[in-house]
Amino acid sequence: MNKNPTVGVLLSRVRVEEKLLLQELASRGVETKVIDDRTLVLPTEHRPDLGVDVVLERCIQHGTALYALSILDGWCVPTVNTYEVAEVCGNKLLTTMRLVRHKVPAPKTRVAFTPEAALTAVEELGYPVVMKPLIGSWGRLVSKVNDRESAEAIVEHKDVLGNYLHSIYYVQEYVAKPGRDIRGFVVGDETICAIYRYSEHWITNTARGGRAENCPVTPELNDICVRAAKAVGGGIVAIDVLERDGELLVNEVNYTMEFRNSIDTTGVNIPAKMIDFVLDVAKRAKN
């Protein structure tokens, strides 16, 4: 008789999403080990003995996830998602370059390395533009720039923040959304569901007050979401998609996705789909 693998859930704290995932594992009788990243100590010179067959990463901080996964990846511990996916999705420029390389439609983007060049990039794209930090989530520090005066102020602020990442200027064309954008949830080779995120504000994140409604997964939407997921390395990801004159553009890809507001909205048991994938990864690693 085949024994179910033991699943480790690497987390910072048990939020709604983690509670649902742990409940799904328990309902299947899967042996589970909660790994608290606040107390975790990982060796580098030998394979970590975590007592699990696969690790599902659910850290809050990108740096914690990235470097924990880098050690696990170095010792060939199966993880969901992989270090590659965390590294690429955690950095907007790396994500953009993967999308471009794999010919996935995305907004036009310019990158500059000095304040003067950043202003040139803004002028080249034309107002309005969107300036984003390379690393960040929930729409934080994302600015819509409507004119030269605003551009100069934002560039000056970034220039004095100190962190070297703020001296890399990521400038994207502004895509006028029809009061909404789309978030598609990809597990493996399938877009399992999607939501519209409506907001009167140009930032539509549900964490910032956006309202979620079910979005039908059309063949076109499934195609662009799955292509985007494969471009960054596959696994379990959420794809943020913009609509423009009938065209779909991938804006961002998220690797530790939140889904609490999308289960009832879509009628899809997202935690079950995720655990199916995690168990499949563990079983394939054993073969």
Image (cartoon, rainbow, N blue to C red):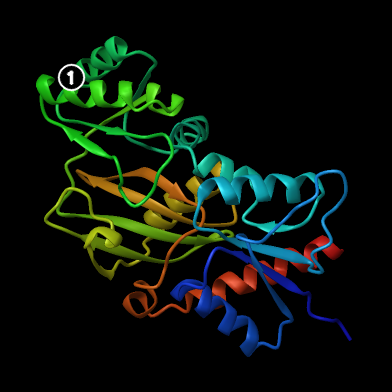
Residue in view at x 46 percent, y 72 percent: 15
Compared across the picture, whether 108 is left or right of 23 comes to left
Q: Can residue 233 be seen here?
A: no
Q: Can residue 187 be seen here?
A: yes
Q: Determine whether 230 is above or below 98 in the image.
A: below
Residue 214 pos. (x, y %): 29, 71
Q: Determine whether 12 is above or below 244 in the image.
A: below
Residue in view at x 74 percent, y 64 percent: 54
Q: Hey, what amino acid is under mark 1?
A: Glu
Which residue is identified by label 1? 152
10 Å crowding of disc 1: few (<14), some (14-19), many (20+): some
Q: Determine whether 167 is above or below 17 in the image.
A: above
Compared across the picture, whether 33 is left or right of 131 comes to right
Residue 267 pos. (x, y %): 38, 80
Instruction: Say which element carries label 1.
Output: helix
Residue 131 pos. (x, y %): 28, 31
Which quarter of the rendered picture does the N terminus lie within? bottom right
Residue 166 in which image quadrant: top left
Residue 226 pos. (x, y %): 50, 52
Residue in view at x 57 percent, y 84 percent: 23
Compared across the picture, whether 251 is left or right of 235 comes to left
Residue 25 in which image quadrant: bottom right
Residue 188 in which image quadrant: bottom right
